[in-house]
Amino acid sequence: MATAEAPMAPITQIEGANLLNLIIVDDERAIREACREIASSLGFKVFVAESAEHAYRVMESHGADVVLLDLKLPGVGGVEALHQMKSRRPDAVVVVVTGHGTVESAVQAMKNGAYDYFTKPFSLDELKLLLERVAGHLKLKTENRMLRESIKSKHGFGNIIGRAPDMEKLYRIIAKAAQSTHPVLILGESGTGKELVARSIHFSGPHREKPFIPVDCGSLVPTLIESELFGYVKGAFTGANHSKEGLLAIAEGGTVFLDEVGELPVDLQAKLLRAIQEKEIRPVGSTRRVPINVRILAATNKELEQAVAQGTFRRDLYFRLNVLTLRIPPLRERRQDIPLLAQHFLDRVNRDGQPKRELNDEALKAMLAYDWPGNVRELENCLERACALATSSVLSIVDLPSSLTAVRGSLTADGNGEPKIIPIAELEKRTILSTIEQLNGDKLMAARLLGIGKTTLYRKLKEYAIQD
């Protein structure tokens, strides 16, 4: 059993260990408790099991990043348990524990996929050093995985574009989350790319070959959400002429992404909570329960804590979904990514067989100054519109929406290089005259692109003392 002959070195939590699940499998309670204390103090989320069968259930419910596995267990032996665990969780790091100083079975276990072994009795310092080494190993694996993803996409992670520090931090958490089975709550304003993050979590993980099913909770009719999620049997309601599987059953082994989960009706929240906890569903109109094996990812642009306080979102469901939280920064908090994103969207337009487009410096400066309340989605729509309406291969500020044109006024500097404010009337005049100039004097087209009537345009030109 564990010993502590000498004072143990001070314990410092391991960076990232709070994202790692560790299962201690040993039939000796003293060993389990001693290991739990050390692992918890290092930051691991710890589960204990006294048998292999118990460990399988824990692994099914919570996943496993690290397993401390005693080779002498009642019932199923440690070697067979190792085989089963590696088949269920190939990426799990399994460390086998053997007693009496014999290492033959431990060496055999390592040939079958164990990461390392150590023998009883062991000191708590030895256990601490082992867990630090395992955490370092997993961190290196994660960083290598991120590097491979970065090679595929030079400007981000998978299909996510961005190199701002907050995005780099987000990528590290995504890579960790991808290897677990915990529910994840993704927070972000509308248009930040919450579904892209959910897809990255699913397709970077070990179940990438299984289904990924997005559900827009905000767009479904409340009376239909239950039948969509849980399915229904023939005759359950008018029009149910045949039975239909629910999305939670169709996604077996994969991921269900609940977008805008805060829009779910409260009564359905209770049924979803029960399905997540019990891993089974009851189709509408049926008395039979159907087992499910899916991972739940949820996203919202709402403040769920406030919704809980107001009684519009169940507290128990909030805590069940909020095992791991990812926050996507709005675009205004990572302005350095705007040129990367703009080029990405322009490249996509160029690949679609459209005339090749690029931004001039003035247009890019206006985009950098704008706050983008609609975030990345608004940026994408802005560039698609500009490409559709532009008459030149170089997109200028007049090709951008008026909301960005107004911001451009704050970028003008006086003779001393200090910013100065341009009156809206003057900004309007410059925009109209610049548009007409770029269109070689075509006033009707200028009015159309500016979104004003031709009568208004001619009136403005008269005010500017410009003759037809």
Image: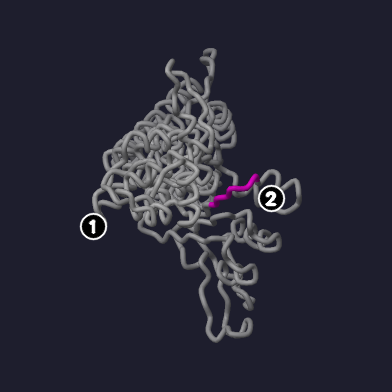
Q: Secondary structure at mark 1?
A: loop
Q: Residue 362: within the magenta? A: no
Distance between mark 2 and mark 1 Cα atoms: 51 Å
The answer to whether residue 294 is above or below residue 102 is: below
Please identify the quarter of the rendering in which residue 352 is found: bottom left
Identify the coloring: one colour
Secondary element at tag 2: helix
Report the residue marked by disc 2. 316
Image label count = 2
Image coords of residue 422 (percent x, y): 51, 31
Q: Is residue 96 visible?
A: no
Which is more foreground, mark 2 or mark 1?
1
Q: What is the x, y in percent for residue 420?
A: 50, 24
The mark that comes first in sequence, 2 or 1, is 2
Residues tagged 2 and 1 counted as in contact (Cβ below 8 A): no
- 443 is higher (above) or lower (below) than 160: below
Q: Residues within 10 Å of mark 1 (few under 14, many from 20)?
A: few
Q: Which residue does the image show at 59% across and 60% down from the upper left?
A: 218
Horizontal side of residue 325 vs 68, given as left or right: right
Question: In this figure, which residue is indicated by the disc labeled 1?
Answer: 353
- Residue type (three-letter) at the residue carrying disc 2: Asp
Which residue is at the front of the view, 251 or 151?
A: 151
Which residue occupies 34% across, 47% down? 345
Q: Which residues are magenta?
A: 298-303
305 or 14, which lies in front?
Answer: 305
Callout 1 amino acid: Gly
